[in-house]
Amino acid sequence: MSEHKAPPFLLRLMSLFFWAMALAALAFWMGGAVWRGGLSGLIAAIGPGSVAIFATFHIPAAVVGILLWQWQRHAMPKLRRVLLEGATLYFMGSVLLGIFLNYLLVSTL
């Protein structure tokens, strides 16, 4: 049985979403480093609801990163593949850290 291949339109859409999320995450952390008041000041300026929605989109970004890696890693240039792997690890780590911190919060109540 051959490996599943996604339609080209879906791959382009997934790539657009993934790289937009990666750039937004990079901008968020860089903004937190230079914003007056640090991350808490940046979160207050953006709005906690917007930050929560952005954080929630880390879950599909992690899934999309894994799928893109599975489907496209052989055809990607090495630099882009390494960027994809690094961003995917960041998104997966963020999701796992969020789950762990929520568990700690709930278990201490």
Image (tube, rainbow, N blue to C red):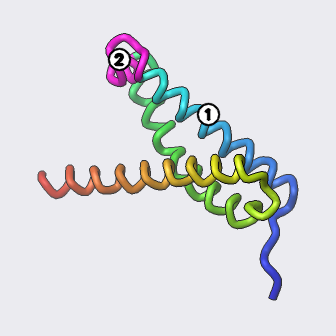
* Above or below: residue 73 compared with residue 81: below
Callout 1 environment at 10 Å: few (<14), some (14 to 19), or many (20+)?
Answer: few
Q: Position of residue 83 (x, y in %)?
A: 63, 47
Residue 55, image x and y in percent? Answer: 46, 40
Q: Residue at x 21, y 54 (%)?
A: 104
Q: How many marks?
A: 2
**Which residue lies most toward the top here?**
36
Badge 2: residue crowd in 10 Å (few <14, some 14–19, many ≥20): some
Pick the quarter of the image with the N terminus.
Answer: bottom right
Residue at 35%, 52% (x, y): give it: 97
Q: Is residue 102 magenta?
A: no
Check the image and report above or below for 28 versus 90.
Answer: above
Give the residue number, with chain letter if any, for mark 2: 41
Q: Is residue 8 left or right of residue 97?
A: right
- In percent of width and height, residue 68 lies at 70, 58
Of the pair 59 and 28, the residue shown nearer to us:
28
Q: What residue range appears in magenta?
A: 33-44
Q: For the residue marked with disc 1, what is the amino acid?
A: Leu
Residue in view at x 73 percent, y 50 percent: 14
Q: Which residue is mark 1?
A: 23
**Quick one: label 1 or label 2, which is nearer the N terminus?**
1
Any magenta on residue 39?
Answer: yes
Given the current orientation, which residue lies at the most extreme left position? 109
